[in-house]
Image (cartoon, rainbow, N blue to C red):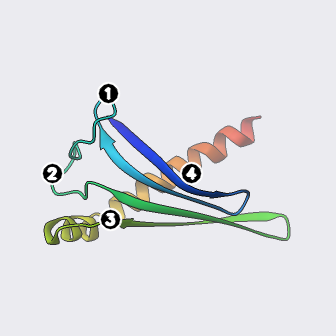
């Protein structure tokens, strides 16, 4: 499974904004392999804030120009998506702690 990211804004060290698309190995946009009604594009905004030496990460993910079916699929999949993103962040945290 491939995913293509197109970055539209990076404000180091505060914010990253990018669009994500499922793709094939040649980077052609394709439908999601897990649900044909998943939005073709999602807009992702990551905000980082520091407070007393600790960094908080806030991530907002929203479908871009979705159909009604894509909105429903996206809304119905929020818990699955949150678990996926959280797992990724925890893996990054574990890698950081090892070094």
Q: In the visual, does 28 lie left or right of 58?
A: left
Q: Are marks 2 and 1 in contact (CB under 8 Å)?
A: no
For disc 4, the marked residue is: 89
Rendered view: 61 above or below 31: below
Q: Residue at x 23, y 46 (%)?
A: 32
Q: Residue at x 57, y 43 (%)?
A: 91
For disc 3, the marked residue is: 64
Label 3: element kind: loop
Q: Marks 4 and 1: which is nearer the front?
A: 1
For disc 2, the marked residue is: 36
Q: Marks 2 and 3: which is nearer the front?
A: 3
Say whether disc 1 or disc 3 marks the residue closer to the N-terminus: 1
Say whether disc 4 or disc 1 marks the residue closer to the N-terminus: 1
Q: In the visual, does 97 lie left or right of 74?
A: right
Label 1: element kind: loop
Say whether disc 2 or disc 3 marks the residue closer to the N-terminus: 2
């Amino acid at each position: 499974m491939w995913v293509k990211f197109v970055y539209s804004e990076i404000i180091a060290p505060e914010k990253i904004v990018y669009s994500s698309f499922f793709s094939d190995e040649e980077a052609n946009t394709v439908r999601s392999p897990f649900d044909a009604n998943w939005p073709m594009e999602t807009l992702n905004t990551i905000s980082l804030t520091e407070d007393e030496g600790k960094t908080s990460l806030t991530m907002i993910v929203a479908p871009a120009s979705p159909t009604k079916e894509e909105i429903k699929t996206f809304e119905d999949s929020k818990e699955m998506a949150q678990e996926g993103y959280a797992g990724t962040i925890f893996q990054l945290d574990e890698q950081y702690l090892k070094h």
